[in-house]
């Protein structure tokens, strides 16, 4: 009886082990064998990272834990169609997105000129210009588009780039251009990549098999070469978060930066110039940190609005008026009316009659003093790009943000009006 009981217990244990093994196999299949969408847009709209977390809710606990840790740090992600070109397309889209996000037309113009000069790189490896010129034109056309109005006026609006990359002809042409540049760069600088070749004996074999063909997914070595050729010279960085089964509570991050630049010399704002990619086995998407995207616009102080107005209407002593620009005009602030009448009616008091004027102080001087007083109380006028950035200490997402506290010392006491000046003026005038 004891032997039968022992045999029965062993059989039950084996059955339980088989069930557990099958469950683990199912979880592994669900987690590791990720099937990217091959029917969606080439580049998707921004989505909340919570959707990514929900996608893995029933997967292996390792993936559940890692995706749950993503959303507090990465607010959004963007899907890339899994057609074999997702890595190339994600890098290409992010390249244009980072350039537009600078909000600087001169930076984009400089990059346009550099891309044009890289045609000599293609010539040096024996590529005929008629083979690549159409692909180069698509890249340069998109650079011109984002470097001009209206695109450059809204650096966080990805619409022009999204439209271009969801046009198959434009998107594929830009990808092909980047492939050719990467291939040529590896041929000219082989020593940086030959030590990492595994399946291909020479760099030329690797280029012809992994880089140049269309529809071949980019690997780690190809990513490194593309970043060396395109991103690093443009002062742009890339980091890839690997969603894998490693023993950690968060995704593993690998950063691609200019290794020749010491950490102490890195420029402020490099985080804003970093492309972030999420790698799942065989597929790349784009992810965004909380500070990468534009925050909601904040209300503008009426006093700052008055200083942003380029036109000032001044009432003269004898009831005359004229319009002048006594102060340096900053860039226009969104939401501020450009109409002269709207600004004047809101920011300046109505004209007073001649008998109420103080003859010793002109209205122009009084207006200047009032604006100088306001400038001492209000913060300096900031650019739109900096005001909406989390680097602004007055922005709610800044680590050092503190709400403004009112205190009695902030009250500006008006100077007492000197009486009798007008009477003395007319008395001296008569004499």
Image (tube, rainbow, N blue to C red):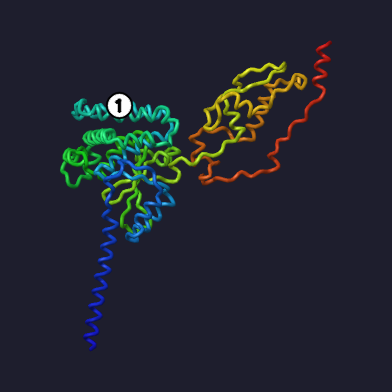
Query: Is residue 163 or residue 111 the one in the foreground?
Result: 163
* Residue located 53% across and 44% down the image: 396
Q: Could you tell whether 406 is left or right of 131 in the image? A: right
Residue lying at the far bottom of the rendered structure:
1
* Residue located 40% across and 29% down the image: 107
The percent coordinates of residue 61 (x first, y second) are 34, 61
* Residue located 42% across and 48% down the image: 75
Query: Is residue 236 or residue 351 the one in the foreground?
Result: 351
Q: Quadrant of the N terminus?
A: bottom left
What is the tally of numbered marks visible in this picture?
1
Q: From what the image shows, is residue 422 above or below residue 204?
A: above
The percent coordinates of residue 225 (x first, y second) are 27, 39
Q: Secondary structure at mark 1?
A: helix
The percent coordinates of residue 279 (x first, y second) are 31, 49
Report the residue marked by disc 1: 116
* Residue located 31% across and 57% down the image: 245
The percent coordinates of residue 42 (x first, y second) are 30, 41
Q: Quadrant of the C terminus?
A: top right
Q: Residues within 10 Å of mark 1 (few under 14, many from 20)?
A: some
Q: Could you tell whether 368 is left or right of 59 in the image? A: right
């Amino acid at each position: 009886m004891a032997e039968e009981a022992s045999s029965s217990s062993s059989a039950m244990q084996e059955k339980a082990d088989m069930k557990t093994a099958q469950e683990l196999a199912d979880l592994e299949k669900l987690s590791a064998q990720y099937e990217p969408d091959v029917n969606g847009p080439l580049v998707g709209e921004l989505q909340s990272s919570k959707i990514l977390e929900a996608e893995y809710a029933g997967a292996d606990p390792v993936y559940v834990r890692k995706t749950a840790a993503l959303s507090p740090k990465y607010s959004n992600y963007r899907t890339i169609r899994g057609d074999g070109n997702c890595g190339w397309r994600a890098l290409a889209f992010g390249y244009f997105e980072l350039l537009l996000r600078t909000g600087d037309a001169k930076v984009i113009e400089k990059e346009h000129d550099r891309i044009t000069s890289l045609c000599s790189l293609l010539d040096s490896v024996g590529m005929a210009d008629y083979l690549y010129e159409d692909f180069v034109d698509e890249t340069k056309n998109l650079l011109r588009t984002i470097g001009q109005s209206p695109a450059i006026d809204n650096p966080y609006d990805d619409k022009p780039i999204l439209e271009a990359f969801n046009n198959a002809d434009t998107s594929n042409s830009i990808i092909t251009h980047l492939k050719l540049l990467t291939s040529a760069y590896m041929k000219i600088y082989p020593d940086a990549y030959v030590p990492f070749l595994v399946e291909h004996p020479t760099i030329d074999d690797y280029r012809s098999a992994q880089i140049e063909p269309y529809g071949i997914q980019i690997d780690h070595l190809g990513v490194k070469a593309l970043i060396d050729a395109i991103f690093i010279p443009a002062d742009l960085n890339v980091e890839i978060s690997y969603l894998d089964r490693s023993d950690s509570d968060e995704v593993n991050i690998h950063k691609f930066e200019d290794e020749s630049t010491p950490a102490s010399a890195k420029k402020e704002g490099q985080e804003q110039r970093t492309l972030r990619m999420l790698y799942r086995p065989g597929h790349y998407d784009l992810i965004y940190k909380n500070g990468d995207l534009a925050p909601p616009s904040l209300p503008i102080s009426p006093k700052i609005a008055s200083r942003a107005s380029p036109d000032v209407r001044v009432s003269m002593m004898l009831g005359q008026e004229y319009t002048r620009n006594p102060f340096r005009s900053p860039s226009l602030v969104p939401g501020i009316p450009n109409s002269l009448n709207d600004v004047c009616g809101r920011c300046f008091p109505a004209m007073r009659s001649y008998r109420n004027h103080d003859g010793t102080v002109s209205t122009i001087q009084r207006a200047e003093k009032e604006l100088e007083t306001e400038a001492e109380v209000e913060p300096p006028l900031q650019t739109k790009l900096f005001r909406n950035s989390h680097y602004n200490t007055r922005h709610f997402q800044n680590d050092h943000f503190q709400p403004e506290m009112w205190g009695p010392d902030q009250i500006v006491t008006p100077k007492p009006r000197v009486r009798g000046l007008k009477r003395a003026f007319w008395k001296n005038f008569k004499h």
